[in-house]
Image (cartoon, coloured by chain):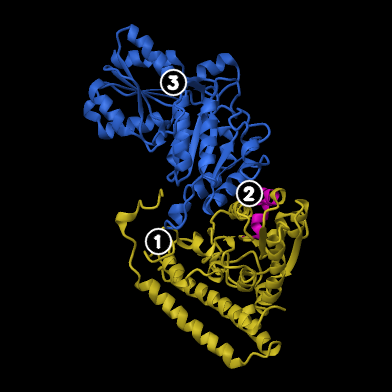
Chain colours: A yellow, B blue
Amino acid sequence: MSLKKQDLLRMYKTMLLIRRFEEQAVQFSLQGELRGSLHPCIGQEATNVGAVFALRPDDLMTCTYRGHGHCIAKGLDPREGMAELLGRETGCSKGKGGSMHWTDPAIGLLGENAIVGAGAPIAVGAALSAKLDGSDRVAITFFGDGAINQGALLEALNLAAAWQAPVIFFCENNLYSEMTPIANMIGTETLAERAEGFGIPAMIVDGYDVIEVYEKTSEAVARARAGGGPTFIEAKTYRLFGHMVGDNEPYRTREEVEEWRARDPIKTFPERLQKEFKIAKKEIEAIREEVEAEIAEIARFALESPWPKVEEIETFVFA
Amino acid sequence: MREITYAQALREALDEEMERDPNILLLGEDIGVYGGVFKVTEGLLEKYGPDRVIETPISEAGFVGAAVGLAMTGKRPMAELMFMDFAWVASDQIFNQAAKMRYMSGGRVKVPLVIRTQQGGGRGNAAQHSQSLEAVFTHIPGLKVALPSNPYDAKGLLKTALRDDNPVVFIEHKLLYNTKGPVPVEDYTVPFGQAAIKRPGDDVTLVSLSRTVLHALEAAEAAAEEGIDVEVIDLRTTVPLDLDTIVQSLKKTNRLVVAHEAHRRLGIGAEIAALVQEHAFDYLDAPILRVAAMDIPIPYSRVLEDVALPGPQDILDAVRRVVA
């Protein structure tokens, strides 16, 4: 395994930061500080972090409205992220985008997306761009199980196969297509087998095992970098929160949620770090304290940030 | 000056711009070996190779989306939609992605993307291959919209589109490809947002665009024989829209007719009429008249299509009425 102790600790820290970020965002939403829809990735942090850690900083990425985790793992400044959620001028979109449109080409982030499946063809274009440049950058597109039935996603799979684009299709199968079981919406056992029909190699990974996600994604990334074309990864994961703030979750049982919660990586990964990797408890404690301080600073920064200037309302419609 | 066709003018614009800027690349269906269904891209695959003239599957949502991704990563893609009607298939990528990406990101990205397509009826292509949809693109903030009516503008506007850092919907007309006109050999561009006065006149301002400009000029000649002096304005772009040229003309004529091949209901004529009454009401001596396609799907049969689409006679009738 290529992961060193420092990498493992950084993974843990990023997962915890994402979890606490999302919890703080939910808090802000309930307090009325945050407008519109919020789709927390609570429960999917290991999937996010394992996959993004397999990328280089200059690799390209699109993700979804449940994308805060990917973006933070890729390097988006969480202070800018939280300020954006609060609609402030210091937000990554200057308050013009909100929760579902974080974008920062400086870190390869070509956007979250509020349209299911829409980021996939954009990522294929970005991958083609890298290929045409003769660079070994790759693109990854994150999407949920629900996107598997969208035309744009299926068209993107075909384009990637036809062009042998260096792109990883990363499906976070959290079992629910918004508020409906994905099992009722498809005719196959797995989502991964869809990809095989396009001539794209596919694999299934345990999305609650950050190390497995990292290793399998690394294989796909290596293949893409070497000119081997696209890969489809289906990560079995689960959100421990509703689809969005306000979801009363009639479509799933409390028992099912508790079963997954027992495996919650935020709880189990530090245990594993101690047992399997002999990392001292105090190092883990130190990370927790660090993250708490960071979250306090993120929240303070966002709350104290100025509102956007109304006279700039039309700025950025055109370049 | 030499005369070339609208299609040749477009090809020259693509060729010269591709030579100038290696980041420009073309994507679309049958644009390579076949040269595009209207032969606009003929010869470009041979000259620039498959990395810059990229043939795509019949997959508009996919390849327009890929073009957005290319544009966000430093390329300057031109995606060709074989028929305007296919834009609906790619509509999410055009309206929700390309048009809004810069604004949603607070200016962190730009999307220098040209969507080239052709529209219009008159050829018996029926309802899914004959629509004129410029008003739809004009409605959505974040897109620029150009509609050349002649070879000179076709080349000059396409060069401007390819040099613009924003998504541009570049709308040709299927019955203009073989029309000829003077086009200089040397490099030039036609700026967006500058309407052209195609024929000066003192009695009526007649605003038009795309192929309907040819009908408008024909109607203006016929009106002249009846002693009505019509000023014909070619909008050239609907975003940005050159309201100033229209208002300046109205100050002289005090009468306005707007003619277009798109449907009447909420067509660009409705927008111009509203703008004029907001900004130049005092200059109007008569109600503004619109000449447009009927609000029905474009029919197939010649006798039906001829009635559905506006022609020179319909425009002449409106000119007569506005001065009556």
Q: Secondary structure at mark 1?
A: loop
Viewer-side residue, A257 vs B40:
B40
**Which residue appears farthest toward the top when viewing the image?**
B225
Image point (58%, 70%), residue name = A241
Distance between mark 3 and mark 1 Cα atoms? 53 Å
Instruction: Find out whether the residues at labels 1 and 2 contact each other: C-beta distance under 8 Å.
Output: no
**Pointer 1 and pointer 2 on the same chain:** yes
Type of amino acid under label 2: Ala
Type of amino acid under label 1: Gly
What residue range appears in magenta? A141-160
x, y (%) of residue A24?
47, 75
* B53 inside magenta stretch: no
Mark sitting on residue B116: none
Mark sitting on residue B1: 3
Image point (72%, 62%), residue name = A223
Image point (35%, 70%), residue name = A305
Q: Secondary structure at mark 2?
A: helix
Residue designated by label 1: A95
The number of discs equals 3
**Pointer 3 and pointer 1 on the same chain:** no
**Which residue appears farthest toward the front when viewing the image?**
B186
- Image quadrant for the N terminus of chain A? bottom right
| Label 3: how many Cα within 10 Å (few below 14, some 14–19, many 20+) | few
Distance between mark 1 and mark 2 Cα atoms? 28 Å
**Which residue appears farthest toward the left when viewing the image?**
B282
Q: Chain of mark 2?
A: A
Secondary structure mostly seen in magenta is: helix
Mark sitting on residue A152: 2
Please determine whether, in this image, residue B259 is positioned above or below residue A193. above
x, y (%) of residue A312?
33, 55
